[in-house]
Image (cartoon, grey):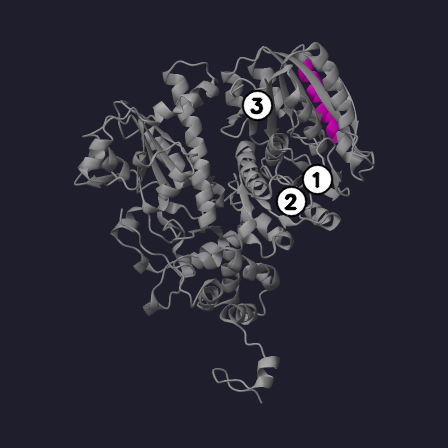
Amino acid sequence: MIRTFDGRYGVKRDLSKFVGEYQFEELQFVVGCGFEIRTPAALRCFAERTSAKIHLTVVDLLNRNDPSYRKARRLQMGNMNELERMASKRNCSFKRIKANLYSKTLRAHVPVVESLIRTLRKFSGDFLLDISAMPRSIVFAALRLLWESKRVQNLFVVYTEDKGVGALETQAAEFRSPKFLPNFHHERRFSKFAAWFPILGGDPRPIQMIKSYMRFNDVYPVVGFPSTKPIETDEIVKLNRGIIGDNTEKLIFASMNDPFQLSIKLSTAIDELRSSFGGDIRTIISPHGSKPQSIGAFMTAMTRQTEVLYCQPLSYKSLPGSVGSSNLYWLKGIPYRD
Amino acid sequence: MPSRVGFPMNEHEVLSYRLLDADTEAFRRIRSLSPTISRRKELTHNLRFMAKYKYDSYEVYSAGKRFLPSLLEWLSQFRKNGEKEAGLIIVRELLFLSRTEMQELSRVTYQNILLEMMDEIIRVQGLNRFDYATAFDRLDPFLEKCVFIGMSDGAQIDYFRRHSGGKIRNEQAVPYYKVDEEEKQFHSKARYAFLLEDMCGSGTTFLRTENAHGRINIVGQFPRFLKKWSKFTSFDAIYYCPYLIAEKGLRRLSMLSVGPKRIVDRRRKLRFKIIPGMIIPETYSILNPHNEMFSNAERHRIMKLCNNYYDREVEDEHTLKGGGCRFGFGGIGIFLVRYNNTPNNTPSILWHANLAKGRKPLFRRLARHHL
């Protein structure tokens, strides 16, 4: 049996404290190489504070269609060199995978998933996914594989905030048209009723695009609350007035920084809807809030078989940002029941 | 010629005229109050939406005058256009917590308490450091040793209990800490106390020192609680669980209760920990030069407004102990309003009423208690 978060409690820790508490022996560490200076922060914490044998896999995110790619690439290469330097200093194995974000279809996750499948054939143990710079389409596909695999003993997710903006990022400059994430689309032929759970963020455009793309019978907008920046909640609500409209009573408040609490909230709402409609209902989540909220959306999608409809960013505002706190989310393993 | 307002309309008038309601009329007047305010459009853009979404639900408002008419009245008392604009800037960054949001914080606090209880089970029973699965199975017998106590009616302890997934029983929840001796006796076997509070600003109400005739006295809710309950129970650990706490208050209370200069339980017989639901950052204070809600120029304008319209009559001997309310009791300086009342930690310009001096509040405050 796989021991995963089951909706009763979730284990979330400050990363620097956790690495002192948990005895890591051997760890598969997967990190997306972004352009922000927070990219190597989590690996640095592990390299400096643990004696674990680390196998490092770096996902090199290519996006040549992005007008600011040249600038982003310069910043990315700085981070890549830093990750390589840390790996070499700690004598870690180092693997670099290229993921093309500019492909018209959502294919960027394929090389990551293929690499993880190869790793799982020869390794069984602890896996950590640093999602700070990783696009959600890759995160969902990689996590699904690791969540379902019996060879993954403990599954950790790490997210480092940008100190200046908190958990709610707004680097995306443009978005692709909405698409269901691979393996998170299972339209039931006879389901006539579709309920949409858009997780609102600091940019209303992707949510508006999804609203124009598909019709839903009912909408339950999800707003981050509580948050390390409490004013964010009202700002999100104001920005997304067009989506919320007069349906403020259908707003779902769910933690901006705690994916487990978001998952508990969403799962409860979905269970209640299904109980009324006898299961004949499509539930669709659009994870456009914070990255930790996306992890909550992932766990809900896995435990409640919901679909995930998402607009992947097409280009970014390439700013180096700043390094905030790193949190660790323990999705699977020792803390949970068989 | 239409009938005068207040007189019956004829059929034609019914079809062609729509009188503005109080909110719409107030909004129209707010927009025309200061046509020279440069950012008038930006600052009033979300007012009607936010009024309907949450501000109108302020429970101190009467049916006849809710947010927009109150805002019109509040802004009108400011003499200069620049002051009216500063008032609108405050409203733009207002931290208003609705009933639903406070209930959400109660739920989040329960989840934080749940993890804390499981950590304690792991520690006391010597389980594997991360064996939460076993700890969760042993939660029910552990809960027998716990009591959940409201420190104020805002804690909504019934709501808290109902959302514990059936874990906390009715008799384990005490609505208010000042209960009769029989009730305290009933909890004599409790080893863990969870003190629930809706909000903590500076923490002065909970714990402080007072100098009386050259002697330092430790006073506040916490020492009062210890005094009242210690006759009947001997707690191993006490957890203070405010659903909402200002970062400044959290730091101050941590220093006074667990730091090296702790003033409570110096013999360290019991453990004390604060488990908050949400922390309001210190950078939200207008007194903080690194304020992240207002530009520096805006911050100075708002402080000037607070100074210009400060009324000394807002103070009493208790508030003066906390440095007065000009920028909020305890120097908290955050424009925070809860659905059921405005804390005195919010600068008084937002809540103080003095009809004789023409001071109008935007969110009138009901004095809840003295320190």
Q: Nearer the viewer, residue A201 or B155?
A: B155
Give residue A196's mark.
2
Classify A310 as above or below A50. below
The residue indicated by pointer 3 is A4
Q: Are marks 3 and 1 on the same chain?
A: yes
- The boundaries of the magenta stretch are A75-87
In the figure, is residue B44 to the left or right of A312?
Answer: left
Amino acid type, callout 1? Leu
Chain bearing tag 1 is A
| Relative height, residue A54 to residue B85 (above, below) | above
Q: Nearer the viewer, residue B186 or B69?
A: B186
Residue drawn where x is 28% and y is 47% of the image: B321
Q: Nearer the viewer, residue B200 or A122?
A: A122
Q: Quadrant of residue B164?
A: top left
Residue A312 is drawn in which quadrant? top right
Give whichever of discs 3 and 2 has the lower sequence position: 3
Subunit under mark 3: A
Q: Position of residue A101 (x, y in %)?
A: 78, 32
